[in-house]
Amino acid sequence: MELRHLRYFVAVAEELHFGRAAQRLLIAQQPLSRQIRDLEAEIGVNLFHRTKRTIRLTEAGQVFLPEARKTLQQAEHAILLAQQTGRGEIGKFVVGFTGPALNTVLPKIVRRFKEKHPNIELGLERLQTNEQVEALRSQQIQAGLLHPPINDDSLRLEVIHREGLVAVLPDSHRLAQSERISISELAHESFIFYPRHVGPVLYDRILGLCQQAGFSPRIVQEVVPQQTILGLVAAEIGVSLLHASAESVAPAGVVLRPLAEPTPELELAVAWNPETTNPVLPAFLAIVRDVTRQL
């Protein structure tokens, strides 16, 4: 049974006249009559009582009519959903993000995306950069806001934001009131860092910055996420070096101070798998580019 058989049946049932139904369907009357007979033969019952002058639905036809209408409506709805999904107007799109992305560009991107695409379900997953790389490879997420470089040439990257590092201190610290802090002034401090595997390139650059200042940092804790680092600093467990945007989520008892020396920048990039078939990706990338151009 094909959908056209149902359309033909509904037209005849509503018109109760083969001639008018044929005109409505823009086909000849004889092929229409043949299609209705084929439908009746396929389902094994007569749907119409026919005489030379009249036609009316049988009891089976009366039962079949609302179900046929329902099936046609469902088919039309399915076609519409498929077309809208193919155009990227509805569906689901999942984005991975890091803590610095949440502090900087992500809120604006999410607001803009929801304004422009209210019918698309936007999923958000907080993941470290290495976790995002794996999720992009497997297409568990469709885009990521992460920190380059990454060891995967199959993914595409665009750097969208850069920020420097700052010293993170308890507000009771002897340097808390300083306008700027030299790295060398932290030589005898206990440090709280994130684990190296979270961002090995930046981690090594920070250690190199300390070594250029004449010391190797004494690391007493390696933790994630950034809120944990900030909380441990507030508890006076040690000091840290974090991206400047961490100030937006710093708890009471913590101060952030600029560094006197040039510091390595933390880059934030949007990443995606070019093999993804999700039609929403181009619209998401366009919004990311538009938002970050205005920063």
Image: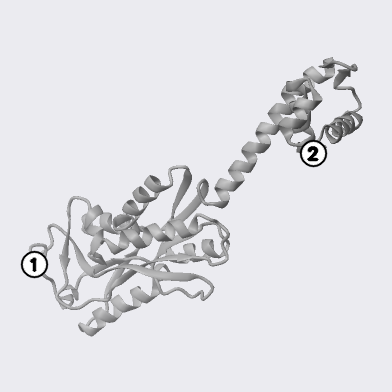
User: Left or right: where does residue 245 sit relative to residue 159?
Assistant: left
What kind of residue is marked 1?
Answer: Glu
Calculate the distance from the C-alpha at mark 2 to the C-alpha at mark 1.
Answer: 77 Å
Q: Earlier in the sequence, mark 2 or mark 1?
A: 2
Could you say where residue 15 lies in the image, as x and y percent from the top left?
74, 22
Q: From this viewpoint, is residue 291 visible?
A: yes
* Viewer-proximal residue among 239 and 277: 277
- Classify 10 Å Cα crowding around label 2: few (below 14), some (14-19), many (20 and above): few
**Measured along the vertical axis of the image, is residue 15 above or below residue 233?**
above
Q: From this viewpoint, is residue 224 visible?
A: no
Classify the position of the C terminus by image quarter: bottom left
Residue plotted at (70% across, 27% down): 69
* Viewer-proximal residue among 24 and 274: 24
User: Left or right: where does residue 285 sit relative to residue 68?
Assistant: left
The type of colouring in the image is one colour
Q: How many marks?
A: 2
* Viewer-proximal residue among 244 and 71: 71
Look at the numbered disc 1 and give the secondary structure of its residue: loop
Could you say where residue 234 lies in the image, as x and y percent from the top left?
21, 55
- Classify 10 Å Cα crowding around label 1: few (below 14), some (14-19), many (20 and above): few
Residue plotted at (81% across, 35% down): 28
**Measured along the vertical axis of the image, is residue 216 above or below residue 146?**
below
Quarter where residue 70 is shown: top right
Q: Find disc 1 in the rendering and name its residue.
A: 179
**Measured along the vertical axis of the image, is residue 72 above or below residue 58?**
below
**Measured along the vertical axis of the image, is residue 42 above or below residue 126?**
above
User: Left or right: where does residue 9 sit relative to residue 91?
Assistant: right
Q: Nearer the viewer, mark 2 or mark 1?
A: 2
The numbered mark at residue 251 is none
Q: Find disc 2 in the rendering and name its residue.
A: 2
Quarter where residue 271 is shown: bottom left
